[in-house]
């Protein structure tokens, strides 16, 4: 070997070292800019100067002890990854339920979301995704910490220069931030995503605490709770009353979407069919307290007359003695029933808070047919069982809340209507799931998702109309409404929280009692139909019929 000549291997090692240095700088910058990148979903968010990167590296360079640098690097990495995770949760919650993740009250909703994923992918698939997420988070912390330490070692050779440069860069950052300098429109050069996210989440926590106090005060005041049963719901004496929630039945289903014409055609045909059987209908919109999911928040809002928009409020009110619609019916002499086909476990709140005497669910209605993804029981079977076991035989007036779940995400595969006489134990549905596509295929195309969402709502509404026109009950009164709008993949970005609501009855005196509401005739509310907040319904219902 010629003396003084550099061998290829040391050159390669030096090149790899330089590459690792560059990659470490990139990782640190990306980690500090990640919250903004996630929030905006735009690569333009990278054209910024992250204050946190400057301060974190300067701090590590100035620390004299190697062990302290390692500990601080891990702590900073955890904070950066946690901030990115919170931004990701904000994005996911905004897309699915129309609001950012609440660091105080949002954790139970993560568990509920896991349940939906488990129902759609199976418990093994959901568990695998959870484990994978954990591995990714731990790996991200390790990668960011290692990158911080490598950049620190790189700059540690120039410790004095860092002492001078860090304050100068920070001062320059403050000037740029003060003047709002932007190299790209909408993206300020001065970035402090980690700090901003931390401040925002702290403010949200404080606001949540204040909101909880105001909510508790409102929940404690309820003049209807002290009324005797003889004064409640007198305008519905002798009637069977059903409150039917149609899952994900939002305004987007009936107005302004590619799939609304199909749903509207079903509603118009339903108007004609119901009129032929002597029914009348009035419809409007309610603004739901939830969006895209967490249906029980809407159910409890309608029942209690309180605005329940978080799991924490739900837990708070269901642990109280707040007067519900179902409790009022029971107090006034009705037999009360809940029918929640998606449930497979006991629901203590159903008896302790809602005061249902009978609780039907996916395990005790004799269903032996197949599952349709999330929906354990097709809506038509739900109606058939309720008709046979609650309405067909001689009975005292019954009030029921029925949850129709065939239009629940992921909206595939979907059931089809069968002759009522052939429903039996549900085995007639056995071939149907294989005739549809699995969620893993459908959800690759948002337009396909939207199409099948529309078809799912059509199925639910067709089941309702077929039930009403097949089984004649002159004393039946229904309140049919959506619980919330579907997720943003269907509703679109910035969609409102409005859902259709209809009152259906044969008795003209029922409709005369709500004439002052000025709701639209028929099942299809117009663009000028009244819009109430969902928590206003209970008191107006009590007033109209009490």
Image (cartoon, grey):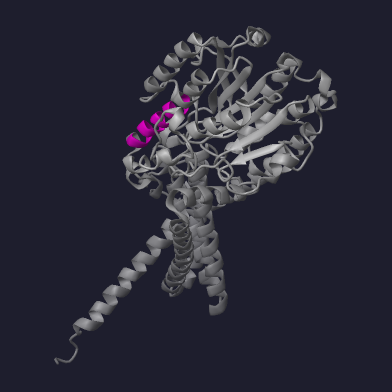
- Quarter assignment of residue 212: top right
Picture coordinates of residue 411 (x, y %)?
42, 38
Left or right of 325 on screen, residue 434 = left
Left or right of 465 on screen, residue 240 = right
Give whichever of 345, 484 is nearer the camera. Answer: 345
Picture coordinates of residue 218 (x, y %)?
77, 31
Q: Residue at x 45, y 29 (%)?
A: 421
Q: Residue at x 66, y 11 (%)?
A: 510
Give the answer, above or below, for where 15 lies relative to 333. Answer: below
Q: Residue at x 57, y 23 (%)?
A: 480
Q: Is residue 477 visible?
A: yes
Picture coordinates of residue 379 (x, y %)?
49, 33
**Magenta highlight: main SS:** helix
Picture coordinates of residue 432 (x, y %)?
36, 39
Left or right of 402 on screen, residue 234 = right
Q: Is the C terminus in the top left, top right, bottom left or bottom right quadrant?
A: top right
Give whichever of 163, 428 is nearer the camera. Answer: 428
Q: Residue at x 60, y 36 (%)?
A: 339
Q: Is the N terminus in the top left, top right, bottom left or bottom right quadrant?
A: bottom left
Give whichever of 140, 95 is nearer the camera. Answer: 95
Q: What residue range appears in magenta?
A: 448-461
Give whichever of 104, 309 is nearer the camera. Answer: 309
Q: Is residue 65 visible?
A: no
- Quarter assignment of residue 329: top right
Give the answer, above or below, for where 118 lies relative to 500. Answer: below
Residue 460 part of the magenta-drawn span: yes
Residue 383 part of the magenta-drawn span: no
């Amino acid at each position: 070997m010629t003396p003084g000549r550099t061998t290829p291997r040391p050159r390669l090692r030096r090149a790899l070292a330089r590459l690792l240095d560059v990659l470490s700088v990139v990782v640190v910058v990306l980690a500090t800019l990640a919250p903004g990148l996630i929030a905006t979903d735009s690569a333009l968010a990278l054209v910024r100067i992250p204050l946190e990167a400057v301060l974190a590296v300067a701090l590590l360079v100035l620390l004299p002890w190697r062990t302290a640098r390692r500990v601080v690097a891990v702590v900073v990495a955890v904070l950066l990854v946690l901030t990115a995770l919170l931004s990701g949760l904000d994005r996911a919650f905004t897309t699915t339920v129309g609001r950012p993740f609440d660091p105080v009250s949002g954790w139970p909703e993560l568990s509920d979301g896991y349940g939906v994923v488990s129902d759609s992918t199976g418990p093994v698939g959901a568990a695998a995704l959870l484990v994978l997420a954990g591995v990714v988070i731990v790996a991200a912390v390790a990668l960011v910490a290692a990158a911080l330490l490598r950049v620190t070692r790189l700059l540690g050779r120039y410790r004095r220069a860092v002492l001078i440069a860090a304050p100068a860069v920070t001062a320059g950052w403050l000037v740029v931030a003060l003047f709002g300098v932007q190299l790209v429109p909408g993206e300020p050069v001065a970035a402090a995503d980690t700090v901003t996210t931390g401040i925002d989440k702290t403010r949200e926590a404080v606001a949540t605490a204040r909101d909880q106090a105001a909510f508790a005060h409102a929940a404690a005041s309820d003049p209807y709770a002290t009324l005797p049963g003889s004064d409640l719901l007198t305008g519905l004496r002798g009637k069977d009353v059903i409150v039917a929630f149609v899952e994900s039945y939002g305004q987007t289903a009936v107005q302004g979407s590619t799939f609304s014409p199909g749903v509207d055609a079903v509603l118009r045909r339903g108007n004609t069919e119901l009129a032929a059987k002597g029914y009348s209908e009035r419809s409007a919109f309610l603004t739901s307290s939830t969006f895209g999911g967490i249906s029980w928040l809407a159910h409890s809002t309608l029942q209690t007359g309180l605005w329940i928009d978080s799991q924490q409020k739900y837990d708070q009110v269901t642990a109280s003695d707040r007067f519900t619609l179902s409790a009022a019916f029971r107090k006034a002499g009705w037999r009360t029933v809940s029918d929640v086909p998606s449930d497979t476990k006991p629901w203590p709140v159903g008896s302790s808070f809602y005061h249902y005497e009978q609780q039907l669910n996916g395990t005790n209605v004799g269903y032996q047919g197949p599952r349709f993804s999330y929906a354990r029981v097709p809506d038509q079977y739900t109606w058939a069982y309720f008709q046979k076991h609650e309405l067909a035989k001689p009975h005292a007036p019954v009030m029921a809340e029925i949850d129709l779940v065939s239009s629940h995400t992921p909206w595939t595969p979907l059931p089809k209507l069968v002759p009522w006489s052939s429903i039996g134990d549900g085995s007639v549905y056995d071939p149907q799931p294989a005739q549809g596509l699995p969620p893993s295929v459908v959800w690759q195309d948002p337009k396909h998702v939207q199409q099948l969402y529309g078809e799912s709502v059509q199925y639910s509404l067709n089941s309702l109309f077929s039930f009403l026109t097949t089984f004649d009950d002159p004393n039946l009164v229904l309140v049919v409404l959506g619980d919330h709008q579907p997720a943003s993949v269907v509703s679109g970005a910035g969609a409102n929280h409005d859902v259709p609501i209809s009152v259906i009855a044969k008795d003209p005196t029922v409709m005369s009692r709500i004439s002052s509401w000025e709701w639209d005739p028929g099942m299809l509310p117009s663009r000028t139909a009244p819009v109430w907040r969902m928590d206003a319904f209970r008191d107006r219902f009590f007033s109209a019929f009490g």
